[in-house]
Amino acid sequence: MLGSLRLADPAVARLSFIVPHVRPGDYTLGFWCKPCAPPAGAFFTTAPPGQRWTPRQHRIVRVSRPASGTTKPRTITGHGLAIGLPSGWSGVIYRRVGGLAILHAASLRLPPVDGDDGGQSAVPRMHKDDVLIVLLEVGRPAAASFPPLTSPLRIQRRDLGAPVEGFPLNRAFARRQFKVSGRAFDLWVEFGTGKASATSLREANRVLATLRVRPR
């Protein structure tokens, strides 16, 4: 089970998820919709039986196994955002209701989003060396005072402080707000221990430096 659907637009449902550990192959997504065919509901799939995967279609997920010894970072993209993930990291980019983008990236396997825009459900899975990055796009007028980002994104010890609501008080937490490419963002970085180590800071900044933002 991957998670719950959310209605993004009339007749358009969205589901954000991390591809689970399954055998390489081609997969369709299926979902049960009770309101679609009351009272019993109906089952739907993203592709009919026999349809083949092609690079240009978006109804079939192709899961492949990385070549042996592959350590090259992979890049995830979506909604005008892109970020590079080192080996062992997972991430997801989706759009919440209202059209604003959200990015989660972590040095662990992320749980399904399922409405958890802040990524708090990943915190209990974190070990002492883990890092969780949450990037929330912010609309006007809340972002009017955000400063522009003039160099590659990074966090420093001066960005560490009290966590936002929902995050534990006994973990190091960094926050930074900025504007770039005509868009505004609120960045949260959660660490696995009460004091962020120099190694964890470097790891977080190595990933943050790869962030790319396209104008809307």
Image (tube, rainbow, N blue to C red):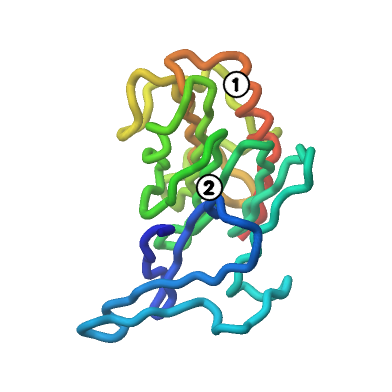
Rendered image quadrant of residue 214: bottom right
On-image quarter of the N terminus: bottom left
Residue 32 image point, x, y percent: 35, 74
Residue highlighted by disc 1: 201
Q: Which mark is residue 147?
A: none
For the residues labelled 2 and 1, say whether their Cβ atoms are less than 8 Å apart. Answer: no
Q: Nearer the viewer, residue 81 or 24?
A: 24
On the question of residue 183 being in view, the answer is yes
Farthest residue in the left direction? 39
Rendered image quadrant of residue 6: bottom left
Q: Secondary structure at mark 1?
A: helix
Quick check: 17 above or below 129? below
**166 left or right of 118 in image:** left
Residue sitting at 43 percent across and 51 percent down? Answer: 112
Task: Classify 10 Å Cα crowding around label 1: few (below 14), some (14-19), many (20 and above).
Answer: some
**88 left or right of 137 in image:** right
Q: Which mark is residue 103?
A: 2
On-image quarter of the C terminus: bottom right
On the question of residue 177 being in view, the answer is no
Residue 5 image point, x, y percent: 38, 65
Task: Classify 10 Å Cα crowding around label 2: few (below 14), some (14-19), many (20 and above).
Answer: many
Q: Secondary structure at mark 2?
A: strand
Total of numbered circles in the picture? Answer: 2
Q: Nearer the viewer, residue 208 or 159?
A: 208
Residue type highlighted by circle 1: Leu
Nearest to N terminus: mark 2 or mark 1 = 2
Q: Nearer the viewer, residue 18 or 164?
A: 18
